[in-house]
Amino acid sequence: MIPELGHYALVLALALALIQAIVPLWGAQVNDATLMRVAPSTALAQFAFAAISFGALTAAYVGSDFSVLTVFENSHSAMPLLYKFTSVWGNHEGSMLLWVLILSVFGALVALFGTNLPDRLRANVLAVQAWIASAFYLFILITSNPFLRIARAPAEGQDLNPILQDIGLAVHPPLLYLGYVGFSIAFSFAIAALIDGKIDAAWARWVRPWVLTAWMFLTLGIAMGSYWAYYTLGWGGWWFWDPVENASLMPWIAGTALLHSAVVMEKRNALKVWTILLAILTFSLSLLGTFLVRSGVLTSVHSFANDPARGVFILAILVFFIGGALALFAWRAPSLKQGGLFAPISREGALVFNNLFLTAACATVFVGTLYPLALEALTGEKISVGAPYFNLTFGPLFVPLLVAIPFGPLLAWKRGDLLAAAQRLIAAAALGLLALATVFALQRGGPVLAPFGVGLAAYIMIGALIDPIERTGLFRAPFATVWARARGMPRSAWGTALAHFAAGMVLLGVIAETQWNAEAIVSLKAGETVAVRGYALRLDGLVPRQGPNYRELVAHFTVREGGEFVDVLTPSKRTFPQRSMTTTEAALLSRGASQLYLSLGDVGDDGAVTVRLYHKPLVLMIWLGAIVMVLGGALSLSDRRLRVGAPKPARPKPTLQPAE
Amino acid sequence: MTRKQRRLALIGSGLAVLGVAAALVLYALKDSIVFFNSPTDVVEKHVAPGARIRLGGLVKPGTLVRGDNLLVRFEVTDGNNSIAVSYTGIPPDLLREGQGVVTEGTLDAAGHFKADSVLAKHDENYMPKEVADALKKQGHWKTEGGYGLAGDSRGAKK
């Protein structure tokens, strides 16, 4: 009964989405306020029905109702409750339902918080949102219905893919989808602006919080996915340049560019056409990501969906929305009015520089990801484009961008002074060079890239702090003054500094991990010891254990550093009988931002177990950096001037309307 | 600068960056792409020793041997031809006889394949897509799904 209810709610959500897609759009054309006002109420109702539908599926999973096909295929009654819950989206059908649920959440948020938007804009935005929603509701109902029943219900399910039974994966897809789908708001705003033929600084002000929110979730989602891959796949890699990862990286890069170009548009009313194009491209890349992952055209870690019909359907959605949006852009964009002027050396110029390099880097990832697909489709030749390609293209394009990061906030709007900015950065550059020299001297003949990378990271981190240091008068003024000034500084400026600082942190982590990673791969018997970088790990013994839906073999290691006891590590091998699969559970030991990484291989006939031990210096900086970056975004988002919707003056005068 | 000059400067620098990106892409594509081959491709195309390729197929039953010092030997077959592969390191959890595998490395002069990475990433049929396609081409594709249940895993040595 409950699954049928969920199915029915989904059909009703589609019906509501169709109304929301057509009526407000018509209302905006004929300027009928009643028709336009249909949009917010249908958006809220659509959300309610999508939530009921998702709730029904969740109930089927949590209650282990194996008469539902997807539950049978992806769940097991002995699975811990948490994984019963997360397996709702650990498969194709459920994850698409999550996709539309999040889409409807964003629609409802626009309806709720967009009360200060002009009626026409809000009606058009919500209508475009509903077009996207309708397409995906149809996709789910026609090709991937999660509520299908099996005529004779089996007694037990087939279990969730063991590598997906993990807390990291539990939160990874929802975060990623909040990012992907969040960009649909920017897309809808862009299309609405094109339909209306009107776009101004206020538009950017309304769009920017949504872009920022989506970008924050996407950043977290990517970082989470990377950490998950790092500790579950058993060999300590945190980024594989896997097509599925690239599929999430491309919208992130485009979204980062959009975030910056929207600032120019908001503050200076320039780069309008470009910002609109970026908004369209960012969501298009999100759709492309969905297509790549969901159609099964790729082989990858995430290949749990394989069905040509689905691929063709998503491809059709892709062509319709991207093609349609770009056609509309080509038709309407020339009529948009020119924006403000600026000199090449200025804050605007720096942001253009940022956009140029980000889009170029995004394009190289795009080529590297899709070229093998195109070549195979055209010639049948199968190739793989791996890490060397991306390191060669992505790296050189990101270096100038990283060097430029601290300059941006130090240049004035309209016309900046590069020399003055460079002078203010001298301290950062000097400390960066000092770091370079220190590393160079300390490692003596180590990897060449390491000192330069560390130097660049130090320069970025300190350079990012120059602006707040100067503005608060730190080291010069008395503490109370500094504190007062720090509190008075706009939160968005703090956010910028923090996010840029975080870019340096990530760089530091990446450089340290890739250049100074030490590994030992050996075969050990009980009582034997493996050593790496001053740590000695003794294998005390192997102990079998029974988990809820798996058996595992746990190895006990005693970790000593210079003879001193540090900790006990227990990596294990799990066997899931339901799927006759084995997973490797690595054991991690954090020492500061560095980690020891220990994973097990096979147990030989003689009782010896192969062991992989890594020392990964500063590896945690990669993910800590991502978190700090998101905190920067959150600070910026909490800025009063950037609240969702239009800002209100600090002390509203009751007789006056808030000025825009 | 006039508006026109500024716009030209903007477009010019944009094109310059894109040009650099395109040059990097072409250079990188020339050097770092790796072609996928089935054992039959290797035999028919006379792949040069030392050239970096991906070799994929099924692990031939009865050939998987674990030697000393983490050495693993097995043969990769597509039904018509097989190639002997050696790999040093910990192979992925799912490297098993009769199941699909993709290895990356080089051929030596004697025709042995020295792999520096072994990937056993599978789709629902325990079969990497490239391997499935290659087997279909060789007419050895089994549709009855005798490869076990769904699942995937991945492992490789950097």
Image: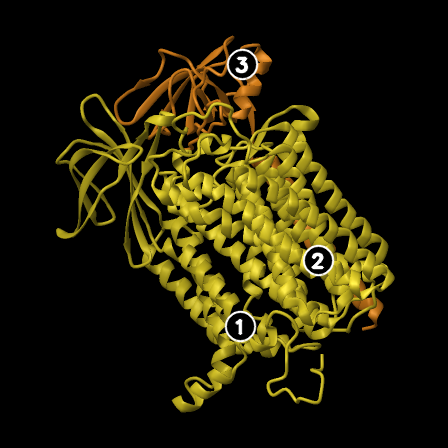
Chain colours: A yellow, B orange
Pointer 2: residues within 10 angstroms few (<14), some, or many (20+)?
A: many
Q: Against A195, is B44 above or below?
A: above
Q: Residue at x 77, y 58 (%)?
A: A24
In the rendered image of this protein, does residue A59 appear above or below residue A383? below
Mark 1 and mark 3: Cα distance apart in space? 57 Å
Tell me where residue B11 sits by quadrant: bottom right
On what subunit does the disc labeled 1 rest?
A
Query: Is A407 left or right of A612, judged from the image as shown?
Result: right
Mark number, residue A638: 1
The C terminus of chain B, quarter of image: top left
User: Depth check: A411 or A11 in front?
Assistant: A11
Query: Is A634 in front, or is A494?
Result: A634
Check disc 1 and report its element: helix, strand or loop.
loop
Q: Which mark is residue A629?
A: none
Q: Name which residue lies at 72% across and 37% down.
A: A316
Point out the residue furthest to the front here: A1
Residue for badge 3: B143
Residue A608 image position (x, y, % from top left): 20, 28
- According to the picture, the residue beneath numbered tag 2 turns out to be A126
Quadrant location, the N terminus of chain B: bottom right
The chain letter for the residue carrying disc 2 is A
Look at label 3 and name its amino acid: Thr
Distance of label 2 from label 1 (alpha carbons): 24 Å
Q: Secondary structure at mark 3?
A: loop
Query: Label 1 sits on what residue type?
Result: Ser
Circle nearer the N terminus (2, 1):
2
- Image coordinates of residue B155 in percent, x first then y, are 40, 33
